[in-house]
Image (spheres, helix red, strand yellow):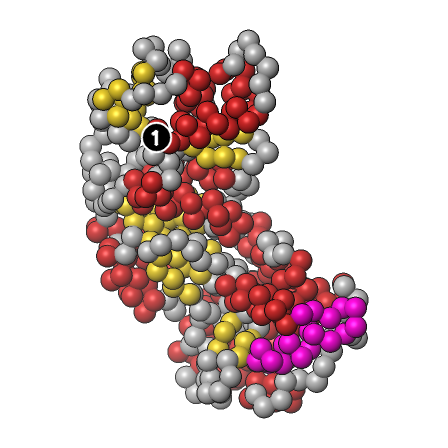
Amino acid sequence: MEHPQIRFGPFTFDAAGRRLLRDGTELRVGSRALDLLDALLERPGEVVDHATLVARAWPHSVVEETSLRVQMSALRRVLGDGDTGVQHIATVSGRGYCFVASLAAPAAAPAPPASAPAPAMAPALVRTIGREALVAELVQRLPATPLISLVGPGGVGKTTVARATAERCRSRFPGGIAVADLADCRDGAAVAQLLGQAVQPLGRAPGLLLVETCEHVIEAAAEQAHALLARMPGLHVMATSREPLGVPGEHLQRVPGLGLPADGTAGVLASAAVQLFIERASALDDTLDFGPATHALLAQLCQRLDGLPLAIELAAARADAMSLGDLVHRAADPLPMLTRGRRTASARHRSLQASLDWSHALLGPLERTVLRRLSVFPGPFTLDAAAALLCRGGAAALKREQVVDALVQLVARSWLQAMSPAGDAQYRMLATTRAYARACLAQARETDLFDPPPAAGTHEARSETAA
């Protein structure tokens, strides 16, 4: 056999002797279940298709796929899959099965010291602005909290906050810090393989795993994070996503936009959003003047961009070629302008449109419909106002239950913000999100059908209409 002896958790698989042991005690396992385990362990972290598994366990017979499922269920029972979140074998729908547990080092190989560091994070090349209080709070909470999820819209800086927190906490995690970016994962098997590889260098001492970009594989990320925490008591996980993982013990931390200037020009330079714009713009052209005469424009620009760090950085990238007045004017329809990201950034962070496209593709048909139709509200709106709008329109009308369900999902996935003013709960959409959703409304040719007057009685509706 290719792997004569393999250890994982409390188990040892002796391929040569065709035995499976747990803590040194041999377990009763059928021969076909052992054949399946052998085939999976030859390709850990990879999907083994149904045909290959059937050929291994029934080499001279023609059997139905039901027989494979029965034997796989028996094998999972022996391994204790499902007990307290433990998982060794993952089902990849329509394809096959994958062994997802971490394998121990071969017995003959010297074990790495417990304090061996995990792969280091790349050093931050730019200063983190406006996140001091949030990072300080997370630094205090993280060592006592096994799982923290940083949640917010695309471009709000979740990864920046996570890595700044991890760097500040490095001394508290002697087992090391590892990073797994799931952006390129397309299925549960890829998630399992990447996370399994990421945690291998972490020692037995407390270690930290950053799991980034979870939203497009949220179920697999949640399942694997939960299993890893159950299997590695010293492990802490900090995840970044547009929506929570939704597993037991998760602490949810929503990441807001950067602080905005108050009305007027006093104290504009104390705003984190303005500080970010000035620093990024000055890095491109150190002759730019941001004296008192520019403060009102700086405040207006950052307010129109909702303090969203990605939008501010993309706007700052044009400050060497456009005046502040031009930037403010174009920020009324920001998507065409915000397209000049760093070449080293991921594809979805090189323009605001790309960031929103990435997230929009993850929504279901109902959520997309509700999102684009809600874009006609210029400011905060209530559930009743949303239902009154979306439950009319003839053949295009939705049911109230559909509106409620979609609102819940859009809040969870950071497309809408829930507000709790005095009276009825309200919801609002970031201006950049509204511009994107309005474009989707136009593409769906629904602009005339769902274009009511502004929601009455809200400060933002009055102020934006006046503007």
Which residue occupies the foreground of this view, 173 or 119? Answer: 173
Q: Position of residue 380 (x, y in %)?
A: 57, 80
Q: Position of residue 467 (x, y in %)?
A: 64, 86
Q: Is residue 76 above or below residue 161?
A: above
Residue 155 shown in magenta: no
Q: Is residue 283 above or below residue 80?
A: below
Determine the residue positioned at 57% across, 85% down.
Answer: 460
Q: Which residue is mark 1?
A: 79
Q: Residue at x 57, y 88 (%)?
A: 458
On screen, residue 386 versus residue 409, left or right, reads right
Residues shaded magenta: 379-399
**For residue 397: magenta?**
yes
Q: Is residue 304 visible?
A: no
Q: Residue at x 39, y 78 (%)?
A: 270
The amino acid marked with disc number 1 is Leu
Say few, some or many: other residues with alpha carbon within 10 Å of mark 1 (under 14 / 14 to 19 / 20 or more): some
Residue at x 44%, y 30% (from the top left corner):
73
* Along the line of sight, the residue nearer the viewer: 306 or 92: 92
Q: Quadrant of residue 321?
A: bottom right
Q: Is residue 211 above or below residue 314?
A: above
Q: Secondary structure at mark 1?
A: helix
